[in-house]
Amino acid sequence: MEKIPITSDGKLKVEDELKNLKTIERPRIINSIAEARAHGDLSENAEYHAAKEEQAHNETRIMELEDLLSKAEVIDPSKLTGKDIKFGAKVLLIDLDTDEEANYQIVGDIESDFKEKKISISSPIAKALIGKSVGDEVDVNTPGGGKSYEIIKVSYN
């Protein structure tokens, strides 16, 4: 079984979502199905079919999250050290074309969120950064074209 890297914060978010789906969404959907069923003829009952579809989506997501947690390998970045970039690293880069700074943290696929500057370990930029250290220059092929960065700082706090 292939292990999936995830930060401790990411695992907590997955566990919270799973708890919400099981303890809040599942009972709410069951009530919706019961109400729709009370309306009579199920063959032409749009509310019933919508509730059953919502139930299927909810149960699928529950199975996905449970599967992910069973394969998760929790890595606490605060316990990591070193100069080389690896999973969990917070990296400060400077774009060599625009001189703009960018901060990213390399996290697991499920917890990536570009708005929060958390990039997936399988993203092109993370793949280019892994194994590099402060002072190195990296070229990244992105869907928007090639970019060049210099690594300014690496931390694990």
Image (cartoon, rainbow, N blue to C red):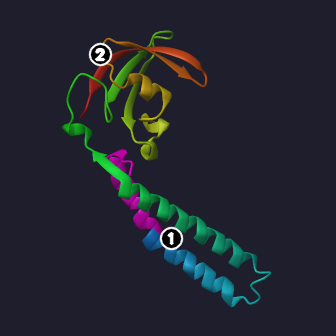
In magenta stretch: residue 9: yes
Residue 8 visible to the viewer? no
Give the residue type at disc 2: Val
Tally of numbered tags: 2
Q: What residue is shown with label 1?
A: 25
- Picture quarter containing residue 58? bottom right
Decide: is 9 above or below 107: below
**SS label for mark 2:** loop
Give me the residue at 25% from left, 43% from top.
76
Q: Is 115 left or right of 70, judged from the image as shown?
A: right
Q: Which of marks 2 and 1 is nearer the N terminus?
A: 1
The reply to whether discs 2 and 1 touch (Cβ–Cβ < 8 Å) is no
Decide: is 35 above or below 79: below
- Picture quarter containing residue 85? top left
Main SS category, magenta section: helix
Q: What residue is shown with label 2?
A: 134
Give the residue type at disc 1: Glu
Q: Is 11 left or right of 114, judged from the image as shown?
A: left
- Picture quarter containing residue 12? bottom left
Give me the residue at 39% from left, 19% from top.
93
- Quick one: 69 or 115, which is closer to the camera? 69
Q: In 3D space, how far apart are the residues under numbered discs 2 and 1 (Cα atoms)?
A: 46 Å
Q: What crowding class fits label 1: few (fewer than 14 Cα within 10 Å), some (14-19), or many (20 or more)? A: some
In magenta stretch: residue 4: yes
Q: Is 62 left or right of 2, judged from the image as shown?
A: right
**SS label for mark 1:** helix
Give me the residue at 30% from left, 18% from top.
133
Give me the residue at 76% from left, 80% from top.
45
Decide: is 122 above or below 145: below
Q: Give the range drawn in magenta.
A: 1-21
Q: Nearer the viewer, mark 2 or mark 1?
A: 2
